[in-house]
Every structure is written in C-alpha cells, then in structure tokens.
Image (tube, rainbow, N blue to C red):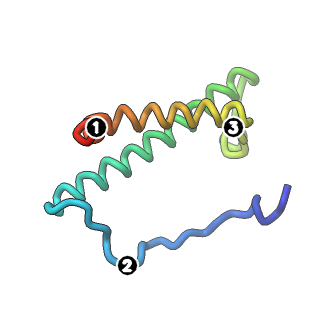
Amino acid sequence: MNDKLDSKIVLPKTAKGKRSVFFDDPAIDQLMTFIMELSTEVSVVYDRLDTIERLLDNQKTISRDDIENYRPSPDVEEIRNKRRSDYLRRVFRIHTKEYE
C-alpha cells in the first residue's frame, strides 16, 4: 500500500472559527450538536463491535491489535454503510418528516 495513505492523520485539537448557527434558539443548536456527536460515537461502537464479532467468527481469541489492525473488505464496508444510513434515518426520522 501507499505509505502516505497508511500514515496517521493528525487533526487539530480545537476547531477554529465561529460555531455554526442553524436555529434561532442556541439551545436547539447545542442539543442538535449533542445528538450528532452521540450518534457518531454510537456508530463507531457499532463498527467496532462488528469488527470484534467478525474476528471471533474466524479466531478463538483476539487482541486489541487484531481489532485495531482489522480492515473491512469492500463487502463488509458496503454492509456497514447501509447500517449507518439506516441508523441515521431512524435517529433523524422525526426531524426529516417535518420537511417531507
């Protein structure tokens, strides 16, 4: 593989610029930010659990290194992308139904 693609990407620890505003009430913006961040974390947990289950299907024991080094196949990535889409559709269904 290309070493540039395999190297770790370092992101800044703080965001720069003004916080985006989407609603008239700042409390709603804060709540939506919280929901988005929590949804992202839950999705990551789903993927990590899926990784653990897939590794255990093929091995009796696994290590943290096995989990960290796992790279999903294109088929697995497709399954995960569908799960993410379905998950986000469920989480935000009330919000999107208002605008349909």
Instruction: Give the mark nearest the N terminus, 1 or 2.
Output: 2
Q: Nearer the viewer, residue 30 or 68?
A: 30
Identify the amino acid type marked 3: Ser
Mark 3 vs mark 1: in front: 1
Mark 1 vs mark 2: in front: 1
Q: Is residue 1 above or below residue 44?
A: below
Q: Residue 68 falls in which quadrant of the image?
A: top right
Q: Are marks 2 and 3 in contact (CB under 8 Å)?
A: no
Quarter holding the N terminus is bottom right
- Marks 2 and 3, how far apart in space? 40 Å
- Marks 3 and 1, how far apart in space? 46 Å
* Residue at x 36% of width, y 49% of height: 36
**Residue ID for mark 2:** 17
Q: Are marks 1 and 2 in contact (CB under 8 Å)?
A: no
Q: Could you classify mark 1 by the number of other residues whose Cα lies within 10 Å: few (under 14), some (14-19), or many (20 or more)?
A: few
Instruction: Give the mark nearest the N terminus, 2 or 3.
Output: 2
* Residue at x 36% of width, y 46% of height: 38
**Going by the image, does 93 lie left or right of 49?**
left
Q: Could you classify mark 3 by the number of other residues whose Cα lies within 10 Å: few (under 14), some (14-19), or many (20 or more)?
A: few
Q: Nearer the viewer, residue 58 or 99?
A: 99
Q: Is residue 68 above or below residue 79?
A: below
Q: Nearer the viewer, residue 25 or 37?
A: 25
Q: Is residue 7 above or below residue 76?
A: below
**Residue ID for mark 1:** 100
* Residue at x 32% of width, y 39% of height: 92
Identify the amino acid type marked 1: Glu
**How far across and how far down the image is residue 49, in percent?**
55, 32
Q: Are marks 3 and 1 in contact (CB under 8 Å)?
A: no
**Residue ID for mark 3:** 63
